[in-house]
């Protein structure tokens, strides 16, 4: 690979990352509640890995009733794509996905974590 081509590729990737950061200045916050076969199948770790790829911030955790809660922050279009990815590609079997937009949520997450 010649140096000029390598530099152009790096510039494109840097531009796309900075574009996501601009979207995060006023993030939309959505809480997902996933029901079905969602615990014991690697769901939380799949969601964390996917969030890293998509640039989504927030957390995911198992709930005592056997469901999974996922709080996610990002632009509306980014969250729509991320939610679609979870529906289509996640391990286990999601029978029901409830979504709640948290309009008054104050905390801005700087990363995506698996919490307990």
Image (cartoon, grey):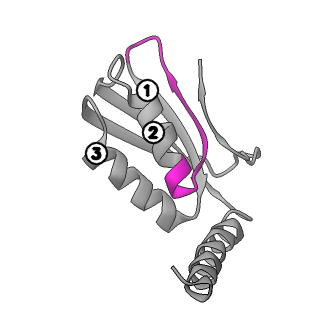
> Is 103 located above or below residue 98 in the figure?
below
Mark whose residue sits in front, 3 or 1: 3
Residue topped by disc 3: 89
Task: Using the rendered view, name the quadrant where residue 43 is placed.
Answer: top left
Q: Does the CB distance between marks 3 and 1 fall below 8 Å?
A: no
Q: Which of 103/57 is in front?
A: 57
Residue topped by disc 2: 47
Residue 68 got which mark? 1
Q: Secondary structure at mark 1?
A: strand
Q: CA distance from mark 3 to mark 2?
A: 10 Å
Residue interval drawn in magenta: 52-66
Q: Secondary structure at mark 2?
A: helix
Q: For the point 46% across and 31% down, which residue is it?
A: 45
Mark whose residue sits in front, 2 or 1: 2
Q: CA distance from mark 3 to mark 1?
A: 16 Å
Percent x, y of residue 96: 28, 35
Q: CA distance from mark 2 to mark 1?
A: 11 Å
Task: Using the rendered view, name the quadrant where residue 28 is placed.
Answer: bottom right
Q: Which of 94/106 is in front?
A: 94
Q: Which residue is at the far bottom?
A: 4
Percent x, y of residue 116: 59, 17
Q: Is residue 48 magenta?
A: no
Q: Is residue 9 left or right of residue 68?
A: right
Q: Is residue 116 left or right of residue 70?
A: right
């Amino acid at each position: 690979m010649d140096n000029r081509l390598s530099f152009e590729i790096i510039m494109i990737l840097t531009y796309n990352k900075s574009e996501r950061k601009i979207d995060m200045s006023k993030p939309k916050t959505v809480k997902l509640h996933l029901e079905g076969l969602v615990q014991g199948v690697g769901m939380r770790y799949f969601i964390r890995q996917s969030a890293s790829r998509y640039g989504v911030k927030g957390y995911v955790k198992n709930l005592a009733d056997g469901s999974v809660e996922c709080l996610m922050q990002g632009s509306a279009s980014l969250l729509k794509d991320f939610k679609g990815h979870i529906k289509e590609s996640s391990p286990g079997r999601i029978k029901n996905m409830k979504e709640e937009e948290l309009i008054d949520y104050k905390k801005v997450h700087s990363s995506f974590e698996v919490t307990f």
